[in-house]
Each structure stands twice: as structure tokens, then as C-alpha cells.
Image (tube, rainbow, N blue to C red):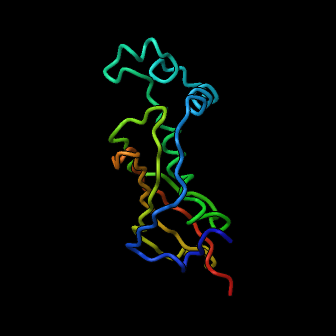
Amino acid sequence: MAGRYYEKFERGEVIRHDTRRTVTETDNVLFSTLTMNPAAIHIDYDYAARTEFGKPLVNSVFTLGLVVGLSVGDTTLGTTVGNLGWDEVKFPRPVFIGDTIRSETEVLDMRLSKSRPTQGIVTFLHRGINQRDEVVCECRRLALMMREPV
């Protein structure tokens, strides 16, 4: 199992994920069109050139998915039952095509499930950081995790 069982996490632990990913134009255009988001700020270079950013912004929902996705191999791959919720999603800086994103995860809280004795709930804080060491995304995620088999 690549991911960790509930018992293998420690409250306060920070996991720095090794895999990084450079965002491409294809990522942004494909994700925006697949999710029916035709916002000009994402897919229209002429429009975006006249904004305060001067170029297209990467779709923030793609950024969120990438940041969490970069964490999966070290945290929940094969050991999560499901996500219970997302909270406090923030995008303090924009992401642009060509930015390289890395991710880190902090374990904020843990508790055993009251109704599922073989599972526990872990509260993660995921951070996405660009190549300039700027936080571009942050979110809290509650994950229902398998406990280690006995």
C-alpha cells in the first residue's frame, strides 16, 4: 500500500511530497473546457492580456486538484475510504502556465470513527507552493481512512 493507514499518521506531522508538476497550457484549456468553465481569464489570451495579470490564469479548481493529487501517493493511495469534506480553500497567489507546483501536507487532527470501528478521520491541511516558494493554494480536507488490519 503506498498510502498510510490511520495509525501511521501523527498529529502535527508535515509531509513534503517529492513529486512536482509544471502546469501546461493544455492542462488549463482542457480542464477549463471539460468542466464547462468558459471564463475568458482562463482560455482567451487576448482578453487576459488586458487584465491586471497580463496573461491567462490557471483554473483554480485545477490547481486545487493538482495540489491534493500530488499528496495522494504519500498519504491516501489505497488507504482512504473517501473524502468527507473540504474546508477553507484559499488561493493567495495566482498560478500561471509554466509554474511548477509542489505540495506539502500537515496532519491537523485525527480521531477514530464513532460509527465505523475499522476507520478513522484525519484532517489534512494541503499547501501548494510554486517555484518561487509562494503559497498558491491551501485547503483543509477531512478523509475517512482505513485503520491498519489486525
Residue 61 position in % (x across, y down): 50, 38
Left-right relation of 144 to 107:
right
What residue appears at the point 47 percent right and 46 percent down from the top-left corner? Answer: 101
- The residue drawn where x is 52% and y is 42% is 22
Task: State how many labels appear.
Answer: 0
Q: Nearer the viewer, residue 145 or 62?
A: 62
- Looking at the rendered image, the quarter that the N terminus falls into is bottom right
Nearest the viewer among 92 and 102 is 102
Q: Position of residue 51 (x, y in %)?
A: 34, 17
Q: Residue 55 versus residue 64: which sits nearer the camera?
A: 55
* Residue 110 at x, y percent in the picture: 45, 73
- Left or right: residue 106 compared with residue 149: left
In the rendered image, which quarter is residue 148 located in? Answer: bottom right
Residue 144 on image: x %, y %: 57, 65
Residue 38, compared with residue 135, is above or below; it is above
- Hey, which residue is sitting farthest bottom in the picture? 150
Quadrant where the image shows the C terminus: bottom right
At horizontal 38% and vertical 49% (from top left) the residue drawn is 88
Above or below: residue 83 compared with residue 109? above
Residue at the spot x=50%, y=54% of the render? 85
**Which quarter of the figure has residue 76?**
bottom right
In the figure, is residue 130 to the left or right of 67?
left
